[in-house]
Image (cartoon, helix red, strand yellow):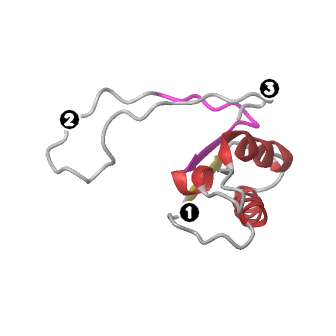
Amino acid sequence: MSAENRFRSYDAQGVPLGLISDAAYSCPQTLRFAPGDILVLVTDGFIEWANSADEQFGLARLKDAIKASRKRSAAAIISVLYSSVLEFAGTTPQDDDLTALVVKRL
């Protein structure tokens, strides 16, 4: 999320790091952070966790949770993401990992 209140998505540049020892990767992208910019990396466990109606949490809800907490610390944003997906999923079991990394430029 940028300081201008918009999102940018970046595609994967190869297989996950360390999965294949001799994997080739394309040139890395350079990201320039302006004050207020936030980088959020999450595993698909956040997006794909479904509720009892078999509706996934999805990217739109993830973005809403990030927008709602963008003024908070990186640790607090992760807490909001986690509590949001838990509240949404209710009693449905967690079938995948939930991993998040938040980097925020102050």
Q: Residue at x 14, y 44 (%)?
A: 22
Question: Which range of residues does the magenta coloring cover?
Answer: 30-42
Callouts 3 and 2 close, C-beta under 8 Å: no
Frontmost residue, 49 versus 73:
49
Q: Residue 7, relative to residue 48: is it above or below?
A: above
Frontmost residue, 45 versus 68:
45
**Split into 4 quadrants, where in the image is the C terminus?**
top right
Residue 86, by quadrant, is bottom right
* Closer to the eye: label 3 or 1: 1
Mark identifier at residue 56: none
Mark identifier at residue 98: 1
**Split into 4 quadrants, where in the image is the N terminus?**
top right
Principal secondary structure, stretch drawn in magenta: loop
* Closer to the eye: label 1 or 2: 1
Q: Is 35 colored magenta in this rendering? A: yes
- Residue 104: image location, x then y, percent: 68, 46
The disc, 1 or 2, on the residue closer to the chain's N-terminal end is 2
Per the image, the residue denoted by label 3 is 4
Residue 35, by quadrant, is top right
Q: Residue 91, relative to residue 69: is it above or below?
A: below
- Residue 97: image location, x then y, percent: 51, 64
Are there few (<14), some (14-19), or many (20+) residues within 10 Å of tag 3? Answer: few
Amino acid under label 1?
A: Leu
Residue 38, by quadrant, is top right
Q: Residue at x 19, y 50 (%)?
A: 20
Per the image, the residue denoted by label 2 is 24
Q: Is 69 colored magenta in this rendering? A: no
Q: Is residue 92 visible?
A: yes
- Residue 17: image location, x then y, percent: 31, 49
Amino acid under label 3?
A: Glu
